[in-house]
Amino acid sequence: MKFSLAQLYRRTRNPRRSSVTFRPIQAPSAFATNLYQSSYLPVVKAWESALPGIVAEYERTLSDITTDAPADLRAQIGKVESDLFGLFATLGFRLERWAQTVEAFQRRRWVGAVNSATGVDISALIGPGDVRMSLQVVIERNVALVRSVSDQARTRIADAVFRGLNDRRPSREVAKEIREAVEMSRRRAKNIASDQLSKLTGQLNEERTRQSGIEEYKWVASGKVHFRENHRARDGKVFDWDNPPADGHPGQAIFCGCASRAYLDLDKILAEAAEAA
């Protein structure tokens, strides 16, 4: 805990109510789109733009099988990986910029939510440095995920062309299969970007509330079409940050779009503070 919001609230407003529920903070999907377009899409496009050359080399290899032919095809695929080195070299910077943007948004919203609910201004009490480690973790995680999208595309493309070569499949069939491989990577990348935004927002929500001395939250169901029944059943219920459900806090389960609403139990917190004193 960095400061006690309960004590600040009592000191400035002397409220009669015993608890405060803050509005939920959910980052707009535009942040997921930005993550996808800036960090994941360039990888997908690199493989997509390489497909004509790979298909052409496949056709040449199929019509003229020599000792070196498969190696030439392998080199054509490997060239894409070489071209991606420059992208990966700047990936950390682009991810850092994205994470900082999300953090600034969440911080502004949290300051606004606190001020709206309690009249307390905490803008001078919190800053980006408070969550530096969490931002670094999400940056490194996404570096690994972007690489995994590229690796998956490469594996599927290579598998398709070399199986096709072995079976002497027509180039049009192989071309269709490797296009589908790229589309699978595109869909996966979009899903990852959305999931990573939910995870970062959820992590920031937890850290900001706990910095304020708030240890509880109310679950906010996502409202997605394909929802988890057990997540919807938690909607509005109070949970403790130190005692998460079996599959984690909101946003932690894969593709979970649920959120949290900080819940400040004034009587409980102040009673515990009095006992500790």
Image (spheres, rainbow, N blue to C red):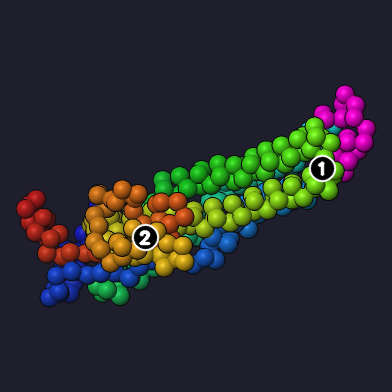
Q: Residues within 10 Å of mark 2 (few under 14, many from 20)?
A: few
Q: Which residues are magenta?
A: 53-71
The residue wearing badge 1 is 54
Left or right relative to 162: residue 139: left
Circle 1 SS class: helix
| Picture layout, residue 229 above or below residue 184 | below
Mark seen at residue 21: none
The residue wearing badge 2 is 229
Circle 2 SS class: helix
Q: Nearer the viewer, residue 263 or 96?
A: 263
Image quadrant of residue 145? top right
Q: CA distance from mark 1 to mark 2?
A: 45 Å
x then y, percent, for residue 274: 7, 56
Image quadrant of residue 270? bottom left
In the image, is residue 150 part of the stretch drawn in magenta?
no
Q: Residue at x 58, y 49 (%)?
A: 93
Q: Residues within 10 Å of mark 1 (few under 14, many from 20)?
A: many
In the image, is residue 59 part of the stretch drawn in magenta?
yes
Q: Amino acid at mark 2?
A: Glu
Q: Amino acid at mark 1?
A: Ile
Left or right relative to 87: residue 199: left
